[in-house]
Amino acid sequence: MTLGLLCPGQGDQSPNMLGLLKGRARAGQVMALFAKETGRDPFALCAADMQVNVIAQPLVCAFQLAVWAEIAERAPAVAALAGYSVGELAAYGCADALAPREVIALARRRAELMDEAFPGGGGMLALRGFDRATVRALCVRHGVEIAIVNDEDRFVIGGAPADIAACGAEAEARGAKVTPLAIQIPSHTSLMRPAVAPFHDALAAASWKRPSAPVLAGLNGAPVFAPARAQEVLAAQLAETIDWAACLDGMRERGCSILLELGPGAGLARMARDRAPDIPARSVAEFHSLDGVVDWLAQQL
């Protein structure tokens, strides 16, 4: 059995997720790094705090690093990792290419730069039921963009709030399932272009190592081994479409026979089960304890 790790982006973070980490020494060390970087006690954050971009992005990364710190030694060998949006940065931390402290600091810097790139705020929504050509035409009509491709009929679009609202209203009227997302920036659209170069500079200034397993680029699902390439794709994805469907296909191509989402949330595991129903996929969010996660992994051997 070979393991593929899925690292989600922001959106599902909540105070409840931290229950998995309480009393865990290694996890506590990682969360202490979050507290030092942000000046906030993660266990004292309320739900509203967790929606603030400069808190949400480093928190999501810290949570995943904390979970992995607790279970890595008891998990099977990792064949590949993939991260959804800011989760791609966390994936490099889980692959030992970046130290946890640097991942958390870079996630905070990423959020700051994205906020500055489009200070009026933005919107994102998930849209299901149309093919890509139909979604592209809809986006052009309303001045928004495809931000993420999740499957042949599942997309996330981003843009200015009024434009996103109008696009969503038309899509819903035409029979699509529309779900607004709790994200206030138009991630992975051209509106984020001012953030790309300074984030690349921040990435280049960090101390990198070659990842212990390939991280699949969110842009196209291709495996990344070299730090210089990692820096390029992590910066570029701020303003370009993420192809998550290609990342899931890449997991199969890399020989992953089981997939584990590090949480919070279970959206990536659900998408994986839909796209590759023959590959067992679960999220840590579906378990009552991290020991339960390890037991499930052992049962797949």
Image (spheres, grey):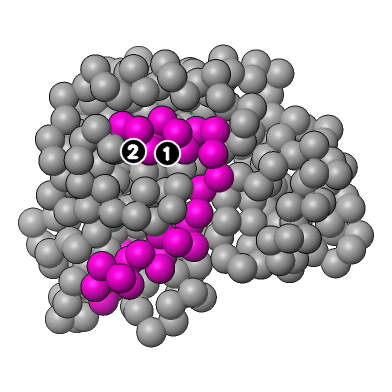
Q: Please tell me the numbered disc located at residue 86.
A: 1
Mark 1: secondary structure: loop
Circles 1 and 2, Cβ within 8 Å, touching? The answer is: yes
- Residue 123 in the image: state x and y as whole percent: 70, 36
Up-down relation of residue 288 to residue 58 (above or below): below
Q: Residue furthest bottom?
A: 278
Residue type indicated by callout 1: Val
Quarter location, residue 255: bottom left
Stretch of the chain drawn in magenta: 231-260
Q: Residues within 10 Å of mark 2 (few under 14, many from 20)?
A: many
| Residue found 22% across the figure and 22% down from its top | 206
Q: Quadrant of the C terminus?
A: bottom left
SS at circle 2: helix
**85 left or right of 202 in image:** right
The answer to whether residue 199 shows anywhere in this view is yes
* Residue at horizontal 67 percent and vertical 53 percent from the top: 126
Left or right: 233 with respect to 255?
A: right
Report the front residue among 64 and 27. Answer: 64
Label 1, label 2: how many angstroms apart (C-alpha)?
5 Å
Residue 17 image label = none
Q: 30 and 276: which one is in front? A: 276
Observer-nearest of 19 and 106 = 106
> In the displayed structure, would residue 35 be above or below residue 4?
above
In the depicted structure, whether residue 205 falls above or below residue 165? above
Q: Position of residue 284 (x, y in %)?
A: 34, 60
Which residue does the numbered mark 2 point to in the structure image? 89
Question: Percent x, y for residue 150?
Answer: 55, 60
